[in-house]
Image (cartoon, rainbow, N blue to C red):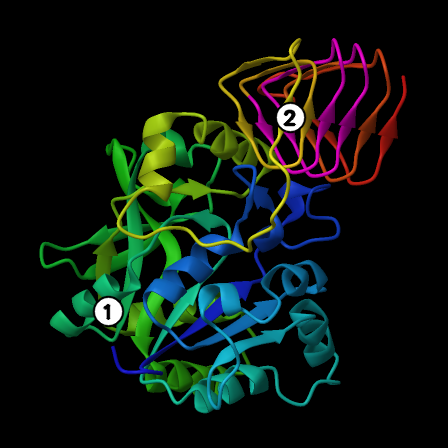
Amino acid sequence: MKMNRICAILNLTEDETALKPLTRIRPIASLPFASRYRLIDFNLSSISHAEIQSVGMFIAGSGRSIYDHIRSGSVWNLESGLTGGIFTYSQQMLKAVQERNGDALDFYMNHKEFIYRSQAEYVVIMGSKIVANIDIKAVMQHHLAKDGDVTVLYKSVPRAFLENRPHEKVLQIDRDEYLLHLVDAKDASSELDRFAMSMNMYFMRADKMLELIQRAELEGLNLDADKLIEHYLPEYQVNTYEYTGYLANIDSIPAYFNANMEMLEKNKFSALFHGSQNVITKVKNGAPTYYAKEAHVKNAQFATGCVIEGTVEDSLIHRKVNIAKDAEVRKSIIMQGAKIGEGSVLEYCILDKNVTIGPGVTLKGTKDNLVVIEKNKTITV
C-alpha cells in the first residue's frame, strides 16, 4: 500500500460518565483490558497492520495516560517522520467550551492541520469504546469497489445487546448495501431480532472529510469528528461494511466487566486475538508470575510479576499483583500493583491500579452490582 495513502483520526472523546471511577483520571482508550492490553491497542494494531503512517488523536481531557502508553509509537511502527507519526491533541472538551464562549480561534484547526500534514488520500475515523480487530485494508477495498462518499462499519447484534443502549445508532440498509437511514436503537423496528449497530467507524476520502468540516464551519457547528460525520450522513451516499469478528462495546462498568470476563472463554479470546491480525501492545518485560504450593488457580488470566499464594478463580490479574495466603479472588478484575491481604475474600470486584486490601477484608458484589475500588485506595475494614 502506498505510504501515507490513509491517515487515521482517533476520536477519544466519548462519554465516560458510566465508567467512573475507572475513568476519573484516564480516558476510555487507556482502560486496561485482558490482563496486559489497553483499549487503544486494538485501534493502533488495526492501523499498524494497514501500514498507516499518520495518526491524529483527539482527546477530551488530559492525555497523560495515553502518552505514557504509546510513547513514540514505535511498537506500532508509528515513529515520527516527515509527514507521519502520532499527533496528539488533548483538552478537546475545554476547547469546545472556549469556542462557545468566543475564546477559541478555530475549533477544527487541528483536524484540518493534521489532514493536510498527513498528505493522505483517505482517512479512517475511529472511537475507542468499541473493542474489535478491524482489517482496514479490507474496508478500503470495499469502499473503492462501491460508489458511496462514506463507508460506515457495522456489526449485526441481537436485540438484547441494545436493551440498555437506547442511543446507539442502528443502520437500515438496502439490498445493495447502501445506508437508507441511521436511527437510535430505541426507535428501531420492534419486529426484528437482530440489528445492524453502527461501530462509529468511518472511511472516506480525506478531501470529503475536509468538505464536511468546511460545511460545519459555515453553519457554526462544533462537533467531534464522529458526530460531525453522523450529522451529515443523510445528505450523502453511504456504503456499509459488515464486521463479523468479535466485538465489545465498553460504555459502562458492567460492559467493561463482562467484556473482560469473556476473555476467559477460549472461543471469544481466540476470535479477538488469534485472527489474521495480531494485537500489538507495549512490551513490559518482567519476571514470570510465581505460584506458591498452596495456591489454587482455576480459569484465570495472569500477567507477569505476580505472587499468588491464595485462591484465584474466574478472574483476570494484571501485572505485579500480590495475593496473600488464604485470600480468595473470584469473578474479579485486579489491576496492576494491587495487594490482597491474607484471608481476604473478593467476589465480583474491580480493583484499579495500586489498590491495597487489608487482611481479612471481605468485598462481595454481584454481577448486577459490582464493587469498584478506584486507584491507590486502601481498604482495611
At horizontal 37% and vertical 73% (from top left) the residue drawn is 52
| Alpha carbons under labels 2 and 1: distance apart | 46 Å
At horizontal 48% and vertical 34% (from top left) the residue drawn is 259
Secondary structure under badge 1? Answer: helix
Secondary structure under badge 2? Answer: strand
Question: Residue 25: x, y in percent?
Answer: 75, 52
Q: Nearer the viewer, residue 205 or 36?
A: 36
Q: Earlier in the sequence, mark 2 or mark 1?
A: 1
The tag on residue 140 is: 1
Query: Is residue 24 shown above or below 194?
Result: below
Question: Residue 224: x, y in percent?
Answer: 53, 69
Q: Nearer the viewer, residue 295 or 221?
A: 295
Question: Residue 50: x, y in percent?
Answer: 32, 67
- Say whether residue 15 is visible: no
Which stretch appears magenta? 315-344
Image mark count: 2
Decide if residue 246 is on the left or right side of residue 67. Answer: left
At horizontal 10% and vertical 59% (from top left) the residue drawn is 176
On the rendered image, what quadrant is the C terminus found in? top right
Q: Which residue is denoted by mark 2 in the rendering?
A: 290
Query: Is residue 7 shown above or below 48?
Result: below
Amino acid found under the numbered disc labelled 2:
Tyr
At horizontal 81% and vertical 14% (from top left) the residue drawn is 342
Label 2 vs label 1, nearer the camera: 2
Query: Is residue 205 shown above or below 299?
Result: below
